[in-house]
Image (cartoon, rainbow, N blue to C red):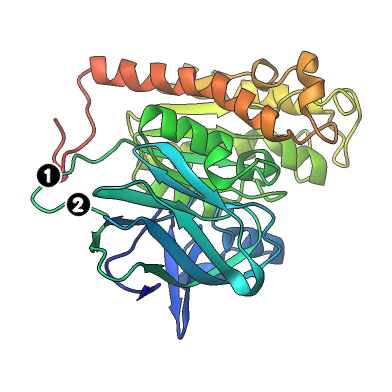
Amino acid sequence: MREIRADDDVLAWEGAVSVEHAPGWSRAWRLPHDRIGLFPGGALRTRAAMPAGVRVVLRTDARVLAGRAAVQGVEVPLDAVVDGAIVASAPVGPGGSFVLDLPPGDKRVELWLPQFGTFRLVSVAVEDGARVWAGAAAPGDPVRRRPRFVAYGSSLTQCRQAASPARTWPALVARELGLDLTCLGFAGEAQLDPMVARVVRDLPADVVVACLGINVYGAGTFSARSLLPALLGFLSTVRDGHPGVPVLVVSPVASPRREAVVGRAGLTLEQVRDRVADAVGLLVAHGDPDLHLLDGRSVLGPEHAHLLDDGLHPGPAGYEHMASVVAPAVRDLLLARTRAGFSPPGPDGARG
């Protein structure tokens, strides 16, 4: 087998905000690693080092893609995706090894990394004699950039309980619509951090989905006085970097046991959901026609309680259902933007 180090330029790290290359391994970060001190909180930093939505991409004619990684707490298999479809899934075995069988012919392979747990890639390998070239472009072929999709949210966006990394709801939406995903789902840590809002602001995006409210309810982060201003500030910061880009705000999904329960900061889940709707309504009324609200109860309502493993977090079928609701909404927003005269940039970065 021919081994390729994780820091080799032939490998593209898609969906990562930054990549840490250390002696012997590389790790994707979903926040800027070189400025991680500006993102207080050990839990947030731990989640940011988990590669949810990150793909290691290469082009090859290999029939086998193997590799080695240093892992901890990884509960799901890796996925190999070709042309948007999962062609192989394989667990990370003892010692961090994995092997995936690939279809024949030249292909662009996306290796989807685990959405939860520590994963530091040491190397990938293909059989001797197989060709490998950079994942960004096939030889001689122009590449039109896929529309960029940024998803921000809580554990329901990081999707620990999804069956595999390419089956989280953001991944399913991205694969169905042909989007380039950056997933900023941070379990327990979607706390409207201003510095995280700046990251969303600064990432390239053609559509943004922001799932807001459930973590601030659970942690009691904001009071009745402070929640609405925090929501307005977060969304306004995102908008500063993305004028004209559709931003879809998803309020908390239904959680029957929590709806009328007063949380730590004196708000019920129903009231938090109302504040999210209020924030969107105010910003639209003050001149932001590209901000949209999707009531979380239409994504997962009381009638979908059987899809929740613990009364709050969906299982694999629940995440597939979420994708089935969110994908049409995202498609409609992108189509509306295209009809208005916008199109994603081509390979040279120029817009059509």
Residue 172 percent coordinates (x, y): 51, 33
Q: Which residue is mark 1?
A: 142
Q: Quadrant of the N terminus?
A: bottom left
Which type of secondary structure does the marked residue at label 2 adopt? loop
Residue 80 locus on image (x, y percent): 45, 49
Q: Nearer the viewer, residue 312 or 71?
A: 71
Residue 273 to residue 74: above or below? above
- Binning the other alpha carbons within 10 Å of mark 1 as few (below 14), some (14 to 19) or many (20 upward) gives few
Amino acid on which disc 2 is placed = Ala
- Pointers 1 and 2 in contact (C-beta within 8 Å): yes
Residue at the (63%, 23%) spot, across then down: 321
Image coordinates for residue 192, horizontal then vertical, percent: 62, 45
Left or right side of 318 for 136? left
Badge 1 or badge 2: first in the primary sequence: 2
Residue 170 drawn above or below residue 192: above
Tell me the amino acid under the disc marked 1: Pro
> Where on the picture, by quarter, is residue 222?
top right
Pick the residue in front: 26 or 66. Answer: 66
Q: To which residue does mark 2 refer?
A: 137
Q: Secondary structure at mark 1?
A: loop
* Mark 1–mark 2 distance (CA, rounded to whole Å): 7 Å
Look at 63% across and 65% down and name the residue there. Answer: 93
Q: Residue at x 77, y 23 (%)?
A: 254
